[in-house]
Structures are given as structure tokens and as C-alpha cells.
């Protein structure tokens, strides 16, 4: 074996004839063991072959890991064999994964190399992969005779007519469609596009048009819009710069860690914002959309979260061109438990799952039947969640010869090492959803070979209510008027958020009274009332003042903060009394969450967020008594001794919250420039830890002169 490279015997490398004969020789064993399990094959001179990830095969011994990780510092499952006992080593023989490995290497490859790859895929009877390779060859050389001949006249005709790369006229019209704001012009373009190709239905193009207006990059705490009556929540989203609304794109659903929090145990520790930090860099590199929802309740395996996560996935698939055959699931810590809960249950959705540093493994038979790959990681010395559960899960998957990798990394603690992230992304990149084809194959899954755009899905009532119909025809009359406009706030979520501008434009007493009734009704959801308060502030109608002043005393911190902000937009001397009472309510709530000198991070964060809105509103309102109110807030929430736990893995940094709030407070004090603020400024000027020491000292100096 010395001097031979294992890559040379990959199903999609080297001599096609030699490769195929070697593959066929092992076929009975592969079929018995399960062709789709990820591993290299170590064929022994005596005994059954060993399925493992081979690390070293040069020299006098073969080094491998039976749990199939390539992370070289892993000890668990790593073994050695004398080279004299090994007959040969066959790299991961699965033709699908071999194809996608080779395809990744050929990103800058020539047309001839892609034709060779396509012919090899055809030998393995992978028609979809072969077609993909031949089309890639034509993208590099449209006149390539071998690729044209391999596709055949009938398929070639369809490819040339529907591919915007191979038909520049079609490509120009599609790009013009995405940029055109005028629906009438788009209708004309639609006819021209469909005269060139029937592969671009109206709903697909209108969804692509809508998607082209979505922001790329990262968006934190985006409010759920789809089915918001049934589920409320926020998610953090990352869209790579490479995203093209005309091309199906892979999607990763990532669940955050944490748990129950707050003094009453009803808040959620962790968030989609904190989770996104694990995935953003890899997503940009791999051209993948990532969505990180924030759990409605903790832990993840609760009915409310199932409803919410399904709505989030459906919303992303309507707003972005998602490849339905490349949707993946991962999660860390509590999110790892969530991945084990969601993965088997929705195995028909996920091409692969990656539970990280969690537990609660289940659904092995379901995952094996659906050919769903599992990338499993745990720190060998994890002090938070015991490694025993995932170690047992890996052993079960090994015995059942499932498609999996288990990386038990030494000295990783409860972290998420970069090498694990890299191996996870590689694992995902080689996997596509397994599907059943036709009634006769019910229950028999096969790996899909071609992308499936979410934009081809049928139009549903939920989509129309949330985002409008993806059609160029005028929407059906909805009745119009105030009654119609009020339906969106009542739905809550993103629909309520979008309704604010429409309601504010009415600027009528009747509209203000109607929205005020929504705000005053404590049975409505938090975001429904929050956006009602915002709409009243933008309306500026005095008819809404009574409801806003009452909401300024609300026990719901989010509603109270929104009421303060709205009142600040509507100058009225009577607001001063509501502000004073509202501050007392806020401070009582803050004190109620203390346990002596301690407070949980979720409670501390929620109160400082609300207090920031209150401080801005007070500064905008101005007037007598405001400096004293600001001082009372600062003394209780910023300057008094208070212990708030720090938890780096959940992104919990109380000092960062304090510095951020101190900056908001200084903005207010600089805006007021009131001599009555001198005492507070002196205290701030002595606190190096709050990051506003110099600003406070300068303002204090200005006021003294």
C-alpha cells in the first residue's frame, strides 16, 4: 500500500473501468451493510471489512476512527491496524457523496472534467446528477459536443430553452423582471419569458421579485409574519451575498442553547441572536441561508415551539428561494436536545441533522429509514451536559450502520470548536433529502439528485394573508376601510408591524379610537398591543392619549415601553403625570425581580431594554421633574450593587447591557442639559466600568460654567 493515494480509488476518480469493477466486487457487502452509511471501507486479508474514517494508511499501520470523524485529535473510537493485515482501502463508496465531493473540487473545473464526472454518474445510474454535470459542462463551453451528445436531443432542447446562462436573452429578461417595479411592465415581461421557456411560472417569478427586495446579510429578531395568529415569536436571519432569487439555495435551521430563566422561570435563556454567531461565517462561505429562531418557551420540545418553528420554516421558504432538498437542522446544548426532538419527527424535511452538545437521542429507525444523515458532536469533558447520552447514541448508530459521524473532541468543554463547525458544514454539503417516488415506492426512500425550489409550491391562503398573492392579477377586493386595516394588527406578528404605517396614514379620530380599543384590551397579544401603541403615536390624534397613558402603567414591559415612546411624540402637559406613575411601575417591577442582591440575566435584560425606551421618551418630553425621574431609574437599575450572572455560551454579558444603557442615559442627559442632573453626572463620572466617564465629566463641566 505504500505510496498509493486513497483518493485515486474514489468512485468518481481514476480509471472508470477499474473503479467500477472494484466497486461491483464489493457491492454485495455494501448492499447488506447499507450503501448510504458514511465511511471508508478497510478490506482485510482475513475477516469482514471495517467501516471507518481512515486517517493514515502510509507506512506500517493504518489509523482510523470507527465513528467516522476526520478531527485528528479525537481519541474516542480511534484505532490502529498493522498495514500487513489490510488488503485495500476503498474511500467512502457512496456515489452521491462522491459526486458532490468531486463537484466541489470542480467549481473552477473545465467542461471536459464535468463531462467525465457526468459519465461516471451515469454509470452509477444517477440520471439527475449526470444531467447536472453535463449542464455545468455546457455553462463552461456551450458548444461542447460531448455534453450535448450525452444529454440527448430531447433533454438538450429543454435545457437550452430554460437555462438563463445558456439563453442570454432569457437571462436578460429574467433580470429585468426582478428589477421592474411596474406590475404592468412585469406582465409584459412574463409573456416574453414564457414564450422563450415554460419553466418560469408566474408564482415563481413573483416570489423571486418579492425575494429580491429582501435584505441580505444578518437581521436580528425579525418578527414572524406567517400564521402569526397561531404563533408569535422572533428569529435571526442570515442571507449570504451570493443569494440569487432565481436559484434554489440551501437552508440551515439552527436552534439556540440555554433553558428556562427569569425569577418565575417563564423566560427563555438564550436567543437566535446568540446562536447566529456560531453559523454566520460558515454560511457565508457555503452560500447557505441560516435561520435561528428564539424559542417561545424552554425547552425546545414543547408544542408552542413546534408550531412556531414550522411557521418560521414555511415563512423562509416563501420569502427566499430555498432548495427543498437541502434543508438542514442543527442546535447546540438545549438546541442539541431540540435537534434530537425535531430531527426524527420531521425527517421528511431535513436532509441531515447535527445535534451538538445535547442529549435525548431518539428516532434512530426513522432516521435510518429516511436516510437522514446525523452529524453528532460532544465535548469529551463537557461540564454542563454529560457526554454519556451522545456516546450511547453514537454506539447505537454504529451498530445499526446508519449514515452518521460522531466527533467526541477532547478539551472542548461545552464549546463549539471551529474544527467541528467545519466538519459539520462539509457533512451537510454532501447530503440531499431522501424522498419516496410514487405510490408503489411508499416507505422506500431514495436520495434526491436535483434541486427543488420552494417557489414552485402552490399558493396558500396563509401566504396571501401574510405577504399578498404572488400573482400579477389585481387582488380580490377585501372591503377596504378601517375594518379591513384593523385585521392585521389583530393578527399580531409581522402583519401587525406592517399595519402601523397604513393605520398612521388615516389620522382620524375614528381610527384612533378603534386602535386605542385594541391597545386597552389586555387579552390581545403583546405585539398586537405594542404596534397599536406605535400606530397611535404616529397618528398623533388626541383621541388615543387616554389609552396610551393607561398603557404607560402596564405591567407588560414591552407594551409600557411602546406607550412611553408614543406619548413622547404627542406633547401634552398631562403626560407628565403618566410618565411619573409609569416610572414607579417600572421600578416596582424591577425590584420584584430581585432576589436580595441578585437578578437573573433575562429579567435584567428585559428591564434595561424597557428602561432605555422610557429614558428616551422622558428626554424627548422634557419638562420639570424629568432629571429626577432619570436619576431614580439610574440609581435603581444602574448604580446600585446588583449581581447578574454572566454566561458566555448564551451570549449573556451583563456589563455590556450596563454600558449600553449608560450610553442611552447619557444621550438623554446631554439632550436635557439640566442643572438638576449634576448629582447623577457626578456619580457617572466616577464609574470607569460604564464607559461614559468622560462624557459625564464633560457635561458636568459645561453645566458648572
Image (spheres, rainbow, N blue to C red):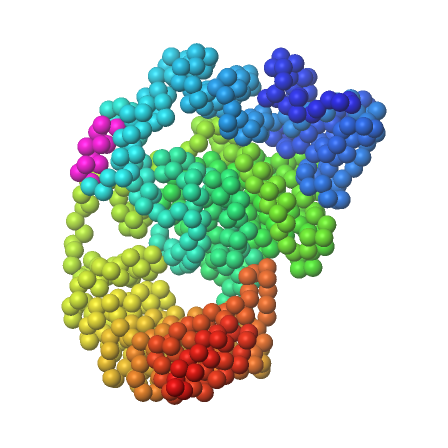
Residue 493 vs residue 41: left or right?
left
Specify the quadrant that holds the C terminus. bottom left
**Residue 609 location in percent, x, y?**
43, 70
Q: Quadrant of residue 62?
A: top right
Specify the quadrant that holds the N terminus. top right
Residue 214 vs residue 280: left or right?
left
Q: Residue furthest front?
A: 705
Residue sitting nearer the eye, 621 or 198: 621
At x 16%, y 55%, the residue is 480
Residue 209 seen in the figure = yes
At x 27%, y 39%, the residue is 179
**Residue 197 location in percent, x, y?**
29, 24
- The residue segment tinted magenta is 183-193
At x 30%, y 34%, the residue is 175
Asked if residue 559 is among those painted magenta in the image, a careful observer would answer no
Q: Is residue 267 above or below residue 31?
A: below
Q: Is residue 66 above or below residue 300?
A: above
Residue sitting nearer the eye, 300 or 253: 253
Residue 619 vs residue 284: left or right?
left
Residue 125 seen in the figure = no
Residue sitting nearer the eye, 335 or 409: 409
How many numbered tags mark residues here? Answer: 0
Asked if residue 184 is among those painted magenta in the image, a careful observer would answer yes
**Residue 460 location in percent, x, y?**
31, 43
Residue sitting nearer the eye, 442 or 138: 138
Q: Is residue 605 above or below residue 252?
A: below
Q: Principal SS element in the magenta part?
A: helix
**Residue 518 location in percent, x, y?**
27, 69
At x 27%, y 30%, the residue is 173
Amino acid at each position: 500500500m505504500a505510496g498509493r493515494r486513497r483518493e485515486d480509488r474514489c468512485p468518481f476518480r481514476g480509471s472508470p473501468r477499474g473503479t467500477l469493477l472494484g466497486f461491483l466486487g464489493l457491492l454485495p457487502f455494501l448492499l447488506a451493510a447499507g450503501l448510504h452509511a458514511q465511511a471508508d471501507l478497510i478490506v482485510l486479508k482475513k475477516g469482514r471489512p471495517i467501516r471507518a474514517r481512515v486517517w493514515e494508511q502510509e507506512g506500517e499501520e493504518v489509523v482510523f476512527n470507527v465513528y467516522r470523524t476526520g478531527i485528528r485529535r479525537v481519541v474516542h473510537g480511534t484505532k490502529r491496524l498493522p498495514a500487513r493485515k489490510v488488503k485495500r482501502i476503498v474511500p467512502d463508496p457512496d456515489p452521491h457523496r462522491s459526486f458532490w465531493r468531486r463537484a466541489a473540487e470542480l467549481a473552477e473545473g473545465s467542461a471536459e472534467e464535468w463531462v467525465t464526472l457526468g459519465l461516471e454518474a451515469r454509470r452509477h445510474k444517477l440520471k439527475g446528477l449526470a444531467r447536472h454535470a453535463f449542464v455545468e459542462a455546457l455553462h463552461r463551453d456551450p458548444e461542447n459536443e460531448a455534453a450535448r451528445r450525452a444529454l440527448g436531443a430531447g433533454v438538450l432542447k429543454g435545457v437550452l430553452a430554460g437555462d438563463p446562462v445558456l439563453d442570454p436573452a432569457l437571462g436578460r429578461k429574467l433580470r429585468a423582471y426582478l428589477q421592474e417595479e411596474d406590475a404592468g411592465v412585469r406582465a409584459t415581461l412574463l409573456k416574453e419569458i414564457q414564450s422563450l421557456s415554460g419553466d418560469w411560472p408566474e408564482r415563481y417569478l413573483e416570489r423571486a421579485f418579492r425575494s429580491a427586495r429582501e435584505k441580505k446579510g444578518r437581521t436580528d429578531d425579525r418578527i414572524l409574519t406567517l400564521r402569526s395568529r397561531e404563533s408569535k415569536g422572533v428569529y435571526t436571519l442570515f442571507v449570504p451575498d451570493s443569494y440569487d432569487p432565481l436559484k434554489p439555495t440551501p437552508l440551515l435551521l439552527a436552534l439556540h442553547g440555554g433553558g428556562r430563566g427569569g425569577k418565575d422561570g417563564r423566560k427563555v435563556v438564550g436567543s437566535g441572536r446568540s446562536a447566529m454567531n456560531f453559523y454566520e461565517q460558515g454560511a457565508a462561505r457555503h452560500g447557505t441561508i441560516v435561520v435561528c429562531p428564539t424559542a417561545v418557551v424552554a425547552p425546545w420540545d414543547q408544542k408552542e415551539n413546534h408550531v412556531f418553528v414550522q411557521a418560521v420554516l414555511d415563512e423562509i421558504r416563501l420569502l427566499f428561494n430555498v432548495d427543498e432538498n437541502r434543508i438542514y437542522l442543527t442546535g447546540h446544548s438545549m438546541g442539541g436536545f431540540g435537534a434530537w426532538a425535531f430531527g426524527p419527527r420531521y425527517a421528511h424535511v431535513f436532509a441531515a441533522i447535527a445535534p451538538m452538545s445535547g442529549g435525548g437521542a431518539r428516532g434512530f429507525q426513522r432516521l435510518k429509514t429516511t436516510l437522514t444523515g446525523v452529524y453528532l458532536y460532544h465535548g469529551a469533558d463537557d461540564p454542563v451536559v454529560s457526554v454519556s447520552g451522545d456516546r450511547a447514541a453514537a454506539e447505537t448508530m454504529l451498530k445499526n450502520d446508519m449514515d452518521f459521524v460522531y466527533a467526541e473532541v477532547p478539551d472542548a468543554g461545552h464549546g463549539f470548536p471551529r474544527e467541528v463547525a467545519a466538519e459539520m458544514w462539509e457533512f451537510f454539503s454532501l447530503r440531499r433529502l431522501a424522498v419516496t417516488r410514487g405510490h408503489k415506492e411508499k416507505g422506500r426512500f431514495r436520495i434526491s439528485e436535483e434541486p427543488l425550489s420552494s417557489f414552485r409550491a402552490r399558493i396558500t391562503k396563509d401566504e396571501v394573508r401574510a405577504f399578498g398573492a404572488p400573482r400579477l392579477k389585481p387582488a380580490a377586493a377585501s372591503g377596504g376601510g378601517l375594518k379591513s386595516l384593523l385585521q392585521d394588527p389583530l393578527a399580531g406578528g409581522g402583519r401587525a408591524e406592517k399595519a402601523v404605517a397604513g393605520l398612521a396614514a388615516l389620522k382620524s379620530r375614528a381610527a384612533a379610537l378603534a386602535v386605542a380599543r385594541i391597545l386597552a384590551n389586555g387579552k390581545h397579544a403583546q405585539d398586537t398591543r405594542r404596534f397599536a401603541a406605535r400606530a397611535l403615536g404616529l397618528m398623533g390624534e388626541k383621541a388615543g392619549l387616554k389609552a396610551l397613558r393607561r398603557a404607560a402603567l402596564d405591567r407588560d414591559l414591552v407594551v409600557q415601553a411602546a406607550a412611553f415612546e408614543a406619548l413622547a411624540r404627542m406633547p401634552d402637559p398631562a403626560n407628565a403625570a403618566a410618565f411619573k406613575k409609569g416610572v414607579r411601575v417600572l421600578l416596582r417591577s424591577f425590584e420584584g425581580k430581585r432576589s436580595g442582591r441578585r437578578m437573573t440575566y433575562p429579567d435584567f435584560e428585559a428591564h434595561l431594554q424597557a428602561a432605555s425606551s422610557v429614558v428616551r421618551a422622558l428626554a424627548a418630553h422634557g419638562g420639570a421633574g424629568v432629571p429626577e425621574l432619570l436619576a431614580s431609574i439610574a440609581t435603581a437599575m444602574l448604580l446600585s450593587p446588583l449581581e447578574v450572572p454572566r454566561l458566555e455560551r448564551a451570549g449573556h454579558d451583563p456589563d455590556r447591557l450596563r454600558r449600553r444603557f449608560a450610553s442611552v442615559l447619557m444621550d438623554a442627559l446631554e439632550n436635557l442639559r439640566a442643572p438638576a442632573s449634576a448629582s447623577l453626572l457626578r456619580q457617572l463620572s466616577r464609574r470607569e466600568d460604564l464607559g461614559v466617564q468622560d462624557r459625564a465629566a464633560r457635561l458636568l463641566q459645561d453645566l458648572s460654567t
